[in-house]
Amino acid sequence: MQQIDWGKLPFGYFQTDYNVRCYYRNGEWGKMEVSSSPHINIHMAATCLHYGQEAFEGMKAYRGKDGKIRLFRWEENAKRMQRSADGILMSKVPEELFHKMVTEAVRLNESYVPPHGQGAALYIRPLLIGTGIQVGVKPADEYLFMVFVGPVGPYFKEGFNPVSMQIVRDMDRAAPQGTGHIKVGGNYAGSLRASERAKEEGYAAVLFLEAKEKKYIDEAGPANFFGIKDNTYITPKSDSILPSITNMSLMQIAEDMGMKVERREVPVEELETFEEAGACGTAAIISPIGKIVDRESGKEYNLSKDGKAGPVSTELFKKLQGIQYGDEPDPHGWVSIIE
Ligand SMILES: *Cc1c(COP(=O)(O)O)cnc(C)c1O
């Protein structure tokens, strides 16, 4: 195996030795297959290529001080992938199959799980696609579920330092009653234009507003948004937000820390009142937000006094990472060790 500089890993694709696959045909899931090829062979009329029948998950496996590898709340990812499948009429992957394939993909690539203490982890990408052929608009009758993995470093190159985000009003990520609440590729296709423009203009990501009224904060690019004030953790409630497992966990940790937790509509103007803000998701865990600029009006919201991450975001981050790496007690039973 090649030498890996664990401390300098980017967040990106990394070729490992194996991936696992399973096909749904004739009304049932087949046997799990192990492959050493990063390629898949599919029909040119597969529905994933034409009508967007594609859903994915993002998880991480963490190596503890004890050398053991831990998964974090995998059941939640399994359930969410079922909701995604349901939302775009794909066959659902049974929870046991999901677990077996994720576990096997990690085990087969064990040597790529970064050592403890580097801030790195093994990223796990489960993927479900319609492989059945259709030319008329219809769901497929065949599906492929696969899992590949690769070691990753921090998502934002800034690391645990505040990033800037941009509010846009001329593009939406998801329709109010669309597919924003499920993890499907179509949402990302629809947000690429806004997010690449934001990057060109110097921002880490777009802060999307709820599409109907454009009054409330919705999704923070590929992550959920939260704000902190008056010992309260506040996160938007909206039907077009993807329910983040990181956010769900941070809400619980905030409560455990004695904070109040509010999940409700968050008007844009409320940004003025936050002491801290952040974006959260498996990739970055927490990305503190230092500044938010409204692209249309030019209005700026400053959320970091000294250019550093705030104390509450820092504590939440440390606590959650501590649980994930096995350094802290796991009072809610979120972590499972891969034997
Ligand atoms: C995956 C994802 C998140 C984060 O979810 P986690 O379960 O915390 O990783 C947030 N928003 C969007 C749009 C996502 O696709």
Image (cartoon, helix red, strand yellow):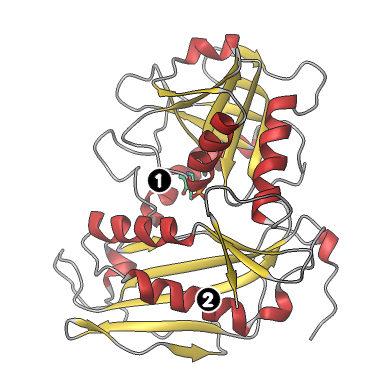
| Labels 1 & 2 near each other (Cβ < 8 A) | no
Q: How many marks?
A: 2
The one of 270 and 197 positioned closer to us in this rendering: 270
Q: Residue at x 68, y 48 (%)?
A: 321
Quadrant of the rendered image containing residue 277: top right
Q: Is residue 332 above or below residue 8?
A: above
Q: Is residue 163 visible?
A: no
Q: Nearer the viewer, residue 241 or 329?
A: 329
The residue drawn where x is 53% and y is 42% is 249
The location of residue 60, given as percent across then percent down, is 60, 61
Q: Label 1 vs label 2: CA separation?
A: 32 Å
Point out the tag, 1 or 2, that comes first from the N-terminus.
Answer: 2
The picture places residue 163, in percent across and down from the top left corner, at 70, 32
| Dot in front, 1 or 2 | 2
In this view, 240 is above or below 307:
below
- Residue 80 seen anywhere in this rendered image of the structure: yes
Residue type at mark 2: give it.
Thr
Pinpoint residue 41: horizontal percent, then vertical percent: 41, 86
Q: Tell me if mark 2 has few (under 14), some (14-19) or many (20+) residues whose alpha carbon lies within 10 angstroms of its own.
A: some
Q: Quadrant of the N terminus?
A: bottom right
Tag 1: Cα neighbours inside 10 Å, few (<14), some, or many (≥20)?
Answer: some
- Residue at 68% x, 41% y: name it: 319
Residue that carries the numbered disc 2 in the rendered image: 103
Q: Which residue is mark 1?
A: 190
